[in-house]
Image: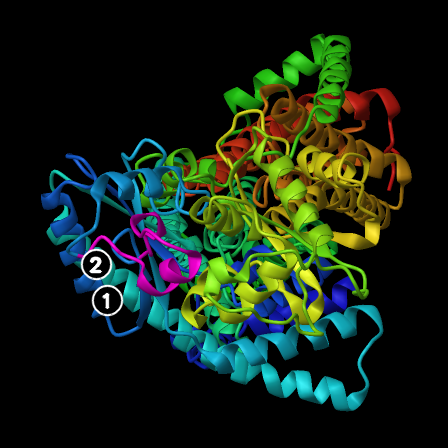
Amino acid sequence: MKKLLDTIYASTVLAHPYLVLLILAGVLAFTASGLPKFQLDASSDALLLENDNDLRKFRQLAERYKTREFLFVAVVPEADFLAPETLEEIGAFRDEIAELPHVENINSLLDVPLVLNVEGSLADVATNFRTLRSDDVNLEKARRELTQSPVYQDLVASADGKVTAIQIFLKPYPELEDLRKRRDELRYLRATEGLNPQAQAELTSILPEYEKFKRLADQAARETVAGLRAVMARYQGANRYYLGGVPMIADDMVTFIGNDLINFGIGVFVFLVLMLSVIFREARWVLLPLASCVYAGTFMLGVLGLVGWKVTIISSNFVALMLIITMSMNIHLIVRYRELFRDHPDASHKELIQLTVRHMAAPCFYTALTTIAAFSSLVVSEIKPVIDFGWMMTMGLATVFVTSFTLFPSLLALTGKKPLKRPETDSYTFTAVLGRFTERYGKLVLVVAVLAAIVGSYGTTRLDVENSFVSYFKDDTEIYQGLKLIDEKLGGTTPLEIVLKFPERTEGEADVESDLAALFGAIETQSDDSWFTTEKIDRIQAVHDYLDNRDEIGKVLSLASTLRIAEEINGRAFNAFELNIIYKRIPAAVRSAMIDPYVNPRDNQARVSVRIYDTLPDLRRKVLLEEIDRDLTEKIGLQEDEYELAGLLVLYNNVLQSLFRSQIMTLGVVMLGIMIMLAILFRSLKVAAVGVIPNILAATSILGFMGLAGIPLDVMTITIAAITIGIAVDDCIHYLYRYKAEYPRLKDPIKTMHYCHANIAKAAFYTTLTITVGFSILVLSNFIPTILFGVLTAIAMIVALLAALTLMPKLILAWEPFPKEV
């Protein structure tokens, strides 16, 4: 079979390189048509668990209570926030941004009703409230209300009056919301029960329409963010303006992804040119692998565009990875060709290429398979961008292998046989030192490996997933500055919703003792469908007060917030009957702003909205949610079916907690897959164990280091262990494959080890250097998880190389897994 494949390969790629290049050019021309369709995605969809039932509930909650995403501008005035010059500038700024085409409405300190500025009954206040734009507004009363009101404090103005916020609501896309709702219903049904052909066809037809309206909404948000920044730039001065909000974060993330793709690609490209030039000092050994890199990268970008796969912040480094892995495989081919040139000086150029391919095809094929196994293991994750990243790299690695064994040898065949400007030597200082160290101090190598495994294993038990979303960004970015300011001064950032569910209403619950004349000047009779009862109000207030007294929680909003303002105006608490009358008689505009966001009589529910201080150093989201859940039953006395926790905090915690499960599952899948492949390649479980142990040690060491150093797992670093094993095992495969080939000839384990250290280990050193520096280039990112991913993976690659060239040879010498005769 090998001879047949060798003959076919020689009669095609080597005999007709121009034809092969023509075919490859045609394939690239076709896939390149997808480049204009290549897209980036930084929406919340890309960072959530797709089939999370809590996500479904969260979106239902948003629809029920008409909550919307918004942009905010936090203003830090130099003078007093109610000084005339401050109000004049904020007013001019507010009116200017209101003219942006996609802005629907704005809420600022100039717009909110100042109910404590009016004397009289609640009815008088509801119909004759003041705002800061009113001529007769009392500024001192306004100051007290804005900084101390249960509603406005930490929402419109900070408690110390040093920061004020402007909310900007964008025009909605009802079609998008309808399509998202139906899409989510069908996806959830598919994940839980499966879809019949009709439902599957509906889902298939919805997706293109959803993407169309999503692009429109994203474009509108992008234009609004750009417009806001342009206006802010004109107003920046003594008063400082900071932009924030989910639409701005998504827009900036798209910019980050685009910059990362460019910076990583250029950085890796420049480094590779320099490295190849220094190592080989010959133009063709620089140009040929670069041609493979460009071809493989362009092909994959085109494919992603054609199939509509979007690149997220998680997969933004896939271009750099493609370049690094392509270069690594090409370096192995170059080094092997040069070794054969040295050992067979009389062989023709075609024979040298054929021998190179023949010797390297099997190990490169299995290294590609093991790396594919590592990346494809990511698809068992529950996190959609991690899953997509796994599939992208799986396709990319297949592309790398095919490119390396078609394009590279075809181009090499056209160069002709030329003397090497820097001939391959019989030894290499760095690898030779490691070989001698292993021979003399093999026991020490084993002791160090065992100690590293113990420490690493202990460190992995200390791994944590608790991290702040604010900490994902560098402190000089607008995202970081805006989120930190709103978190510290305006009541926290991460939202949590507590939905209270009430039992069916019974007759006679309302207290009819009231003085309606004091409120409305007339007596009204209670309607049969009155919703407000003493029991419901007491329950809402109890939950509100419990949450408000927790240190981790900032702003709390509920019906209790509105009631306390109304009671301050009224001079006493309302009974249930009065509240039902108020609910019916209050102006619609006031009710929609102050009551409807917090109660839903139709569904017999109430909503308590809170925000968490995301920058608290000791915040433990899972523990916080568990404590709230327990306290609502034990302290407040609710039954489990009488409340529900929802919101971004729950969704974010679900993502974080899934990281642990994903880490365990991906490691298990990778180890099993690689063990099976090595056992098949070498037909020996002992050899498979020898090849996997150094890489498990590297993965355990880096995870242990993260645990001991307090570096939490996140959506990027979750992939480190799988990638480390998948990529680092390549060097082990090449080493073992060469050892197996040379051992029958040399018939001495020590000599064979030194031979491999002088030859194949040199290529392993070059490739590890390529990978290490290539990953280090990720420090150019603005996304902290990407930086950590790059640095930690680079360190893991170094550990893996040292283990492959010390621990693995010692295991070979100790276990003798190879026969002397083959």
Q: Residues within 10 Å of mark 1 (few under 14, many from 20)?
A: some
- In this view of the protein, can residue 23 be seen by the observer? no
Measured in 3D between alpha carbons, the distance from the residue under mark 1 to the one under mark 2, in whole angstroms, is 6 Å
Could you say which disc has been placed on residue 382 in the image?
none
Q: Residue at x 59, y 28 (%)?
A: 758
Magenta part of the chain? 112-134
Residue 62 colored in magenta in the image: no
Report whether residue 663 is seen. yes
Residue indicated by mark 2: 94
Instruction: Give amino acid for label 2.
Output: Arg
Instruction: Please report the residue visible at 58 percent of the width from the left and 51 percent of the height from the top.
Output: 574
Rendered image coloring scheme: rainbow
Q: Give the image quarter of residue 783.
A: top left
Q: How many numbered badges does the structure rendering display?
A: 2
Question: Is residue 501 toward the left or the right of residue 18 in the image?
Answer: right
Q: In the rendered image, which quarter contains the C terminus?
A: top right
Identify the disc placed on residue 98.
1
* Closest to the observer, 104 or 730: 104
Circle 2 sits in a helix, a strand or a loop, which is it?
Answer: helix
Note whether 22 is above or below 516 in the view shown.
below
At a point 61% along the width and 42% down the height, the residue shown is 544
In the image, 566: left or right of 144? right
x and y percentages locating residue 364 in the rendered image: 65, 51
On the image, the x and y values in percent for residue 41 come to 47, 63
